């Protein structure tokens, strides 16, 4: 479970990084005028997310690191393609629409990435892997940018962030339902997780039984060695 969660957050980090790399491009003056706030906040976010990805690559296992480097290469290639096409092949309104669509698609992917965690919460009936502050931040951030996009009549801002606000609200509702269950064993009475827990418990019992058996054999052997001279003396006395 820990490995799956770690890999999930690594993938999410790459998707978020892709979204944040594209959003500053959409907010540039020659792409979408009067959107400087989009450029500044997402530019700062790009730096922070890049740091997250570097930290993940430093401490991840070799297999996860190789897989993540492959995903990062794909992310970089898509980003470079979007930038080159928008700068060299498109102009004016076409450039705005192209960059806006790209940013919208990947921002929706970013907001949708916690869906697997929401599924895990429902399955285990535990909020251990869905921190409250993160869910609250997703809701507040999505709602703020949704309102900003509505006021500016910018569909490339209010559509993805409206989705983010809705998904953030769903996370908060799930947290309210399962907030009292924060242990990994909260849903361990059913399904695959319970089977896995039973298998682990059986393995522990089997290992303990083997150790006890070996100890019993050793004790019996020691007893035999100690008692053997007494038996010999008894037989000799009878003779």
Image (cartoon, rainbow, N blue to C red):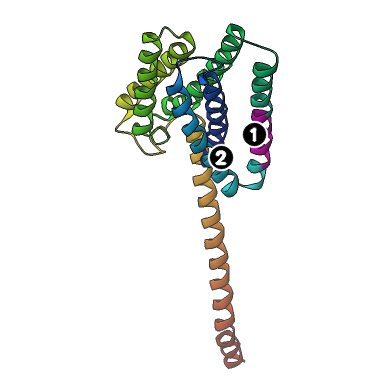
Name the secondary structure under disc 2: helix
> Residue 28: x percent and y percent?
53, 21
Name the secondary structure under disc 1: helix
Mark 2 crowdedness (10 Å alpha carbons): few <14, some 14-19, many ≥20 = many
Instruction: State yes or no: residue 73 in magenta.
Output: yes
Residue 182 quadrant: top left
Mark 1 crowdedness (10 Å alpha carbons): few <14, some 14-19, many ≥20 = some
Disc 2 target residue: 53
Disc 1 target residue: 72
Most foreground residue, 125 or 77: 77
> Residue 156: x percent and y percent?
49, 12
Most foreground residue, 23 or 60: 23
Q: Earlier in the sequence, mark 1 or mark 2?
A: 2
> Residue 37: x percent and y percent?
42, 23
The magenta-colored residue range is 66-76
Instruction: State yes or no: residue 89 in magenta.
Output: no
| Residue at x 63% of width, y 41% of height | 64
Q: Are marks 1 and 2 in contact (CB under 8 Å)?
A: yes
Residue 169: assigned label: none
3D distance between C-alphas at marks 1 and 2: 9 Å
| Residue at x 45% of width, y 18% of height | 35
């Amino acid at each position: 479970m820990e490995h799956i969660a770690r890999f999930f957050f690594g993938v999410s980090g790459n998707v978020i990084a892709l979204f944040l790399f594209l959003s500053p491009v959409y907010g540039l003056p020659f792409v979408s005028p009067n959107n400087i706030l989009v450029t500044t906040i997402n530019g700062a976010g790009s730096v922070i997310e890049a740091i997250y990805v570097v930290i993940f690559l430093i401490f991840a296992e070799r297999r996860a690191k190789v897989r993540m480097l492959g995903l990062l290469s794909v992310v970089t290639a898509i980003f470079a393609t979007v930038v080159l096409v928008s700068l060299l092949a498109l102009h004016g309104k076409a450039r705005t629409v192209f960059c806006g669509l790209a940013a919208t698609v990947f921002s929706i992917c970013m907001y949708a990435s916690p869906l697997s965690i929401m599924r895990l919460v429902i399955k285990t009936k535990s909020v251990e892997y869905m921190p409250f502050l993160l869910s609250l931040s997703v809701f507040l951030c999505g709602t703020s940018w949704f309102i900003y996009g509505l006021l500016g009549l910018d569909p490339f801002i209010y559509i993805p962030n409206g989705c983010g606000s809705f998904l953030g609200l769903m996370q908060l509702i799930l947290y309210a339902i399962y907030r009292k269950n924060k242990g990994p064993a909260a849903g361990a009475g059913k399904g695959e997780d319970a089977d896995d827990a039973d298998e682990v418990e059986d393995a522990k019992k089997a290992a303990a039984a083997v150790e006890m058996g070996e100890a019993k054999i050793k004790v019996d052997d020691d007893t035999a060695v100690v008692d053997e001279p007494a038996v010999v003396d008894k037989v000799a006395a009878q003779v």
